[in-house]
Image: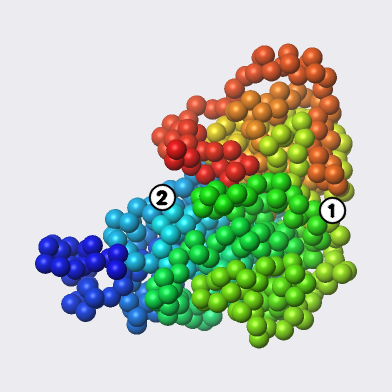
Amino acid sequence: MKSNLITKWPEKAANRSMLRAVGFNDKDFNKYQIGVASTWSNITPCNNHINILSKAVEYGINKYAKATIFNTITVSDGISNGNFGMKYSLLSREIISSSIETVCNAQSFDAIVSIGGCDKNIPGCILGMCRLNLPSIFIYGGTILPGKNRTDIVSVFESLGKYYSKKIKENELLEIEKNSIIGSGSCSGMYTANSMAIAAEVLGISIPNTSLQNAQSINKILNCINSGKIIFNLLKNNIKIKDIINYNSILNAIKVISLLGGSTNCILHLLSIANCLNINLNLKDIKNISNNLPTISDLKPSGNFFISDLINCGGIQKFLKFLLEINILNGDCLTVTGFTLKENLKNIKNNYVNKILKNINFPLKKTNQIKILFGNLSKNGCISKISGKEGEIFLGKSKVFNSEEESIEFIYKNKIYKKTIIVIRFEGPKGGPGMREMLTPTSALIGVGVKKDIALITDGRFSGGSHGFVVGHISPEAYNKGEISILFDNDLIMIDTINNNILFFVNKKKIELRKKFFFNYSKISYGILNLYRKMSMDSSTGANFSYE
Ligand code: FES
């Protein structure tokens, strides 16, 4: 046992002495030591119940081994969005993964169970587990229920746009603010947290049928308790995370997320997981997948239903079985149960169709919402999510902003003409630094009622809650002198999601001239943001730290 480094032999007396003080007894020193990484925090409803879940995990583990709970940090995108704090969001993924790696190796744990409930702590937990390569399980904190009149966090962001465009009064805005988020759990649509939780289950690192559970439910507690037996089983059989996550399991996750209309952030995180495990996956692979899949789910942000509605309809197990039977999923990938995906689904029926998940032969849309685009404006690729309601090709003139704040001020105070393409740059991983999400500008556009007539492109990211004609992750980013940095107002741009192109039409001479006068509008940064600027890789490979 790896943990013998701190529990066995006379020379470990000092270590044991310390451990006795935190509740260990003689028998505990002969057991597997399992770290329980909790992302509990009282700063956000996504995570404020995770203490209870980590206690349930501890209880489940202690029947078979010895659990030790430790905490890592979290930030809340729902709170940080639209301000300076959001620069710390993606960076927090790296801090979380690094802190999990640090504690687990410092404490010589034999295995790890991590619990995450928000956009960045889920991939943070997974990346930490990947770096450790121990027997590992990821547990999702679960989804929040919708608020009054079927509202949620995105309703509040969009109401703000309605308020600024005088469509609702301040008291109506306050009413929405007070009643949209009630209780604990992750944001309720097919936004990033729910998308990543589903990805984790399809990857095989979560217990089957646990990514779709309400945060405050008996099933969620049972999921936590059951993890004890399963992690013990993984230890006995020496099944580590690298035995589970591979190229095929990542492709499986991308396919399911694409079909369900998941968040573009999921693509970023899956690229970073692949990168961390030295799995050769790139945006072209993802482009080929999404080009061949339809959109079948009516989930928010662009659809009508919440994840809790999908839970009430029976979850996604039947859907996964169906995908397996029509050979969309590779069933041979190993999972935390010790069985393959195909074996886990053996007794599940494939009759998945319901009011949310449409028949794949009669989809909501024949093409997929997630589109990977390439072109002279983004040579390394970028990601869009187009529901189709806005059209599939957008030709318009640029209106350029060098930060999110500049764009928000403009949207709220000015008339925006039809066929404008709002360009928000110097918001990439290095330029921001931190690759902020542009939820506030996209919500503002929807709120002021110009969603169909305006497109928005950026080297930053989008929240899973963003919708409209939006393209993010433009790479190379402006900070790295990507072509987005040389756009002027009124340049003609074409976003063609049918042919996966993003192009700007400026003649070669002008392009060369503009390149000579490149100006870095990126703000001076400090502290850990500066470290992220130095260490972050390109968004087309996941924007994680480069440790080289
Ligand atoms: Fe945590 Fe949305 S802010 S899941």
Q: Which residue is mark 2?
A: 98
> Residue 533 placed where, x, y %?
50, 34
Asked if the residue at label 1 sits under 8 Å from ligand 1, the reply is: no
What's the residue type where badge 2 is placed?
Answer: Ser
Q: Quadrant of residue 485?
A: top right
Q: Residue at x 58, y 46 (%)?
A: 542
Residue 485 seen in render? yes
Q: Which residue is mark 1?
A: 388
Vertical arrangement, residue 477 with respect to residue 506, above or below: below
- Report helix, strand or loop for mark 2: helix
> Residue 476 placed where, x, y %?
65, 33
Report the disc number at residue 363.
none
Q: Residue at x 85, y 54 (%)?
A: 389
Q: Quadrant of the C terminus?
A: top left
In front here: 361 or 530?
361
Q: Residue at x 83, y 69 (%)?
A: 360
Q: Nearer the viewer, mark 2 or mark 1?
A: 2
Q: Is residue 61 left or right of residue 158?
A: left
